[in-house]
């Protein structure tokens, strides 16, 4: 489908955001959850989204103005006080996640994030051990990062991470998740890809996100949400894009977002994975928080407005269903910050949860704990590597790097 790259004409049903890639119709995930309509109510202003990941390209043309001072957490042993150093990305994964959640809109450049007026707090926990290595980290560093971000006042904490073992993240991670929720931050966790292993987040106070492909199918990689307490699905795309499909005349099946380039110029890439689904939800929750809802009400409203997928009602594959930012934000003004909370039964219940407080739980162990507590669990990204493009000032000038 040929489109005018800089033309103001919106595609059918999707308002122009004033961003080249969006207005060329490339951001199908952004559009699928009704983001533009949601902006009539809120745009994420005053909300901070922590991106615990491989770092973020803090100089990226489509992110820089939204980024607040972050940090790296490495060899911390779980102690947030030992987080120090630059959160700059040296991989691209975290930059991609950040853009989906909160890239700058209406700058005639690149993409639009779901919450374009939110702040991005980058926390680097994934590092490349060699130039050709994928980024990895340790579970104690992820836990430290969650605590550090919480202490900095993060409102939403995005975790597009997984473990290489069936130990998932271990008890230190669950403790960090509870620490965040106790202080009013909403943890958002990618459900994982088959390449990693099925995640089971049990009753931990986190929103678990599975992925849907373009056209609402189940992607080749996606786990279900299992028994997660609060579970939803968002666009994560599928692998198989080419430079052509990930271009202004193409129709990507992955998710297009900002990326890091070793050449230092602003890059973009099409990636897929539950890593890409989670920041759609993080951005949407930022919209609800900026509309005045408290964390529990924001989650409740999100769960109450999903579009059912798969088996009728909540299910272990899609949770409550596909998130709908337009419907949720339309509801937000009538809810306010102190609503009653009743959730779909298969995704748990928020009954009795005070704003910013976790429910009392006596859940059976939500995580399988590794026998060797002294061995840090390896943590990896949850994206299927896709097509990297470099945009410079305009995405129209992209070229393929690899
Ligand atoms: Ca933009
Ligand atoms: Ca269903």
Image: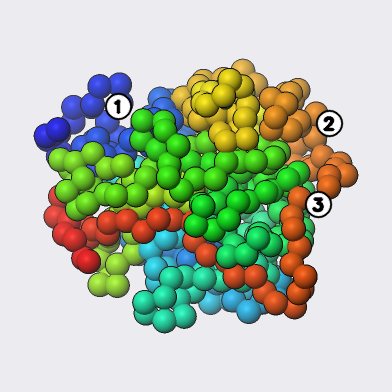
Closer to us: mark 2 or mark 1? 2
Report how far apart the C-alphas of labels 2 and 3 lie in the structure.
21 Å
Report how far apart the C-alphas of labels 1 and 3 lie in the structure.
45 Å
> Are there few (<14), some (14-19), or many (20+) residues within 10 Å of tag 1?
some
Relative image position of residue 55 (x, y in whole percent): 47, 65
Residue at figure coordinates x 47%, y 80% from the top left: 129
Looking at the rendering, in which quadrant would you find the C terminus? Answer: bottom left
For ligand 2, which image quadrant applies?
Answer: top right
Report how far apart the C-alphas of labels 2 and 1 lie in the structure.
39 Å
Callout 1: CB less than 8 Å from ligand 1: no
Residue at figure coordinates x 52%, y 65% from the top left: 380
Say which label, 1 or 3, has the lower sequence index.
1
Which residue is under mark 2?
Answer: 352
**Closer to the camera, 62 or 172?**
172
The image quadrant of residue 321 is: top right
**What kind of element bears circle 2?**
loop
Relative image position of residue 219 (x, y in whole percent): 43, 41
132 w.r.t. 261: above or below: below
Relative image position of residue 79 (x, y in whole percent): 72, 72
Residue at figure coordinates x 25%, y 72% from the top left: 263
Which residue is under mark 3?
Answer: 365
Residue at figure coordinates x 59%, y 62% from the top left: 163
In the image, which disc is placed on residue 72?
Answer: none
Image-based side of 26 in relation to 342, left or right: left
Image-based side of 276 in relation to 10, left or right: right
Which residue is under mark 1?
Answer: 15
Say which label, 2 or 3, has the lower sequence index.
2
Count the marks: 3
Closer to us: mark 1 or mark 3? 3
**Closer to the camera, 276 or 13?**
276
Let me know if residue 50 appears in the view: no
**What kind of element bears circle 3?**
loop
């Amino acid at each position: 489908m040929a489109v005018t790259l800089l033309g103001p004409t919106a595609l059918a049903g999707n308002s122009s955001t004033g961003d080249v890639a969006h207005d060329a119709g490339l951001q199908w995930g952004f559009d699928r959850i009704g983001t533009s309509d949601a902006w009539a109510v809120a745009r994420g202003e005053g909300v901070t989204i922590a991106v615990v990941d491989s770092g973020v390209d803090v100089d990226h043309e489509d992110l820089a103005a939204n980024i607040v001072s972050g940090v790296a957490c490495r060899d911390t042993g779980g102690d947030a006080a030992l987080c120090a150093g630059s959160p700059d990305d040296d991989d691209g994964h975290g930059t991609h996640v950040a853009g989906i959640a909160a890239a700058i809109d209406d700058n005639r450049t690149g993409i639009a994030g779901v919450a374009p007026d939110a702040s991005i707090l980058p926390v680097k926990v994934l590092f490349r051990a060699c130039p050709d290595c994928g980024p990895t980290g340790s579970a104690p560093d992820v836990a430290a990062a969650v605590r550090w971000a919480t202490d900095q006042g993060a409102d939403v904490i995005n975790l597009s991470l997984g473990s290489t073992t069936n130990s998932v993240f271990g008890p230190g991670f669950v403790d960090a998740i509870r620490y965040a929720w106790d202080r009013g931050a909403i943890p958002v966790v990618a459900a994982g890809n088959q390449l990693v292993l099925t995640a089971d987040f049990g009753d931990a106070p986190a929103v678990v996100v599975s992925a849907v492909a373009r056209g609402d199918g189940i992607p080749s990689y996606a786990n279900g949400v299992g028994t997660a307490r609060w579970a939803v699905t968002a666009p994560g795309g599928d692998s198989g894009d080419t430079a052509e499909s990930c271009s202004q005349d193409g129709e990507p099946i992955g998710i297009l977002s900002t990326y890091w380039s070793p050449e230092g110029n602003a890059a973009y890439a099409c990636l897929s994975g539950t890593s890409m689904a989670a920041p759609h939800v993080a951005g949407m929750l930022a919209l609800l928080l900026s509309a005045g809802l408290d964390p529990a009400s924001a989650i409740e409203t999100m769960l109450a407005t999903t579009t059912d997928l798969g088996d009728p009602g909540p299910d272990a594959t899609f949770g409550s269903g596909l998130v709908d930012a337009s419907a949720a934000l339309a509801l937000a003004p009538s809810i306010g910050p102190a609503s009653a909370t009743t959730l779909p039964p298969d995704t748990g219940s928020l009954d009795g949860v005070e704003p910013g407080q976790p429910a009392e739980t006596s859940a059976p162990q939500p995580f399988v704990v590794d026998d060797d507590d002294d061995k840090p669990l390896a943590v990896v990204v949850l994206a299927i590597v896709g097509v990297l493009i470099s945009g410079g000032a305009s995405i129209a000038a992209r070229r393929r790097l690899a």
